[in-house]
Amino acid sequence: MLLSELNKEIRFIKGVGEARARLFHKLNIYNLFDLLTFYPFRYEDRRNFTKIINLQKGIGQTVLAEVIGYDEFYSSRGRVLKILVSDNTAVLSLICYNRNFLKKILLKGMKVFLFSNKFEYKYRQFQTSEFDFEIFDEKGESNINLHTNRIVPVYHTTEKLSVKMIRKLIFQELEKLREQMDDPLPAYIRKKYKLKDFAVCHYKIHFPSDLKEIEIVRQRLAFDRFFFLELMLALNKHKTVLIEKKQNYIKENTVKGFVQTLPFELTNDQKQVIQEIFGDMKDKKMMNRLLMGDVGSGKTVVGLLASLLACENGYQVCLMAPTEILASQHYQTILQYLKGFSGVPVVLLTGKQKSKEKEEKLKAISNHSGQIIIGTHALIQEDVRFNNLGLVIIDEQHRFGVRQRALLHLKGDTPDVLVMTATPIPRTLALTVYGDLEISMIKEMPPGRKPAVTKWFSQTQMQKVYQLLEEQMRDKKQVYVVYPLVSESDKMDLKNAEGMFQTFKEKVFNDFRVGLIHGQMKKDLKDNTMDEFRQGKIDLLVATTVIEVGVDVANASVMVVEHAERFGLAQLHQLRGRIGRSDIQSYCILITSQRLTNEARMRMRAMVNFNDGFKLAEVDLELRGPGEMMGTRQTGLPDYRPADLIKDTKILQAARKEAFELIDRDPQMQGFPVLEKALKTEFHERLNLVQVG
Ligand code: ADP
Ligand code: MG
C-alpha cells in the first residue's frame, strides 16, 4: 500500500532538497502527489530523426549525431563554445553561450540525441543555440531517453526550474511507484466504465508511448478528479443533513431599519435572493448557498443584509475575500453602508498586519467585540478564534475551493455558509460542481448603469488610445491600464507594468497623476495606492490583474487591457466589470498584437459584441470545445486538471452519480478502505473536516 507515500514532502524527494523545494512551492507542488499530478500542458513528438542536411527552420526536430570536435568564436558576449556534431549528411554547430561545461559532458566520439525548435542555417552552417540533448547509450541498458527519442512531456515552469529537471524527477518517482500503487477506485466502477489502471494511467499521462493513448488515460484521471470532488460534496451534504444547527433567528429590526437608510431601492432580484437566504438562515438545517450574479449586480449589499441579521441575533459573521485589496475594499464599503449604525463593529484582518495590531484584532474576534470580521485566507488560520460564528460569507468562490469552505466550517460549530460568485457558470454545471449548494441568482442590474463600449485595437494604434485616455482624464475621469501576469512571479511581465508606469509618468502622461499596483507590492503600499485611486488622487492606474475582481471605483471610465489576447473571456469580462458602474459613459479598450490565433480573434470579437456575462460564458464554452488538449485556466472556472469542466461533462456526471450512490450506501466507506485512504491522501486536510466516522 503505497498511496500514503504520495504525501511525502517534495523536499525529501531524491534530487530536490530545500532550495529546489522552494521553487517547486511556487508551482504549487508541495508533495509527491502534487508532483505526479503536475500534468504536462503539451507533448512534443521527438521520435523521428531528421538528417542534419534536411533540417528546417522553425519546427521541432530531433537529430541523432556524433560529437566530432569543438570550436570557438568571439561575440559581444565574449568567448563562445561551439560543439560540432555530424551524422554523415552534414555538420551541425551547437552554440553554447555560458555553457562551457558542456565540453566536459559531450565528449568527442559520443553519440547524442539533440532536440530543438530552433535549428537554423546561418553563416553557411546548420546551427542551434537552444537545444535539449541526451547521450545515446549504445548498450541500451540505461538508455531511457527521457528528453528525446520519445513523446516528451512539456511542463509549465518557473525561471529557475528547468522542464528537464521536472521531467527527470517525475520519471524517477513514477518508475518507483509504477508497480506498487493500489487502485483507489472501487473495482466495480472501473469495470463499469472500462477505466484503465491507476498507476498505468499516471505513468502514461506523462510518458505516453503513443499519442492516441494520451486521451484514454486522461479520461481515467479526469474521472478520478471528479470522483474525489463529488465524494467530498457527497460527504459534506451527508454531514449537513444530519446535523441540526444551533443558531436561532428571531429578531429582524436592524435589517428593516438598515434597508430604510439605503440610498437606493433594492432590485427585485436582490429582494428575491435575500428572501431565499433569510429562509435558509431561519431553517434548522445549515445554509449552504451559492449566490451568483454578474459583476456589478449588487451582491455586497445582499451579503451585508444577511450579516446584519446574524449580528442582531447575537452571532458573528466572517466575510472572506480572495485578495487583500478586495478585503479592505469590502471593509471600506461596509463601513460606508453602516455609517448610521453604531453597534455593529467591523474588524479587518489580513495576513500582513503588524503583530500588535493583529493581536488586538484577534482578541476582538475571540471576545465578540468584533461582529463582522472581514479578511482573506488569514481568517482560516488557526490562531483565529471566533466567538459564536453564525454566518460565513465567501466572496468570489472560484478563487477558493471546497477545502477553504470546509476549513471555515471548523471555525464555528454550525455556521451558515453563503458563497458569492460573479463567475457565470451555466446552471447545470454549477449544480454539479457546487453540488452541495443551493443556488440563488441575481440577473438584473441596478438601474441607471450605462454599459461600457468595448473597442479592439492593435498595438500600432496606441496613439488613438492615448488620446482617448487624455480626453477622459482631462474630463476628471480615472483610467486603468492593465498588463498581464502569467503568475505573480513572472518577472518579464512585471517589468512590463513597472516599465510602462515609468513611461507614462515621465513621458506620455506627465501632466497627470500616475499610480502603479501589482501583486508583489507590500500590502501597505497596495492599500495606499488603492485608497488614493478611490479618492481620485490618481488619474491613471497601471495595474496587473490584482484589480481583476470586485474593485469598485465609480468614477473610473476607461479600462485598457494590453496583450488582451493573453486573457481568457471570463477574465476580460471581470476586468471590464471594473468600469461602467455608474451613468457615465465608459470604455473598455482591448489591445492585441497583430498576429493572433483564430480563437483569440473570436474572443476579442465576443468582447466587443456582448456585455452579458452569461452570453460570454456560452461563447467561451463553444470556443473551448475541442480546442485545448488540457484544461486552461482561462474560463475562470475552477481548475480540475487533467479534467476539463466543459469537455468532460459526461465523465463529471458519471463520477457524480457513482460518488453520491456510494456515500448513500456506505457513508463511512467501510467497504472501500483503499478509496478512503486515497481520499485522505488527496484531501487529507479536507477530510478531517468532513469527519468521516
Ligand atoms: P457585485 O455584485 O459585483 O459585488 P457590488 O455589490 O459591488 O456588485 O455593487 C456594485 C455597485 O452597485 C455598488 O456601488 C453598489 O452600491 C451599487 N448597488 C447595489 N445595489 C443597487 C441597487 N439596487 N440600486 C442601485 N445601485 C446599487
Ligand atoms: Mg463584489
Image: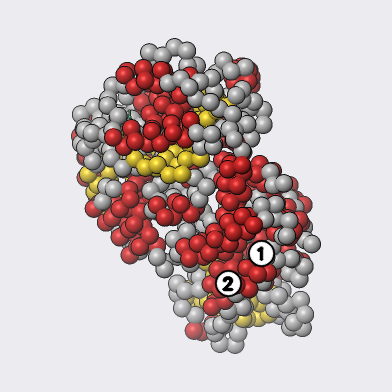
Residue 239, horizontal then vertical, whole percent:
62, 43
Q: Amino acid at mark 1?
A: Leu
Question: Residue beneath label 2, please?
Answer: 193
Question: Residue beneath label 1, please?
Answer: 185
- Would residue 38 be visible to someone looking at this image? no
- Would residue 629 be visible to someone looking at this image? yes
Give the image's coloring scheme.
secondary structure
Residue 317 against residue 193 in the figure, above or below: above
CB within 8 Å, label 2 to label 1: no
Identify the residue at image location x=53%, y=56%: 640
Q: Earlier in the sequence, mark 2 or mark 1?
A: 1
Q: Quadrant of the N terminus?
A: bottom right
SS state under label 2:
loop
Report the number of discs: 2
- Give how far apart the Cα atoms at labels 2 and 1 are: 11 Å
Q: Would you say 360 lies left or right of 76 here? A: right
Residue 109, horizontal then vertical, whole percent:
71, 80
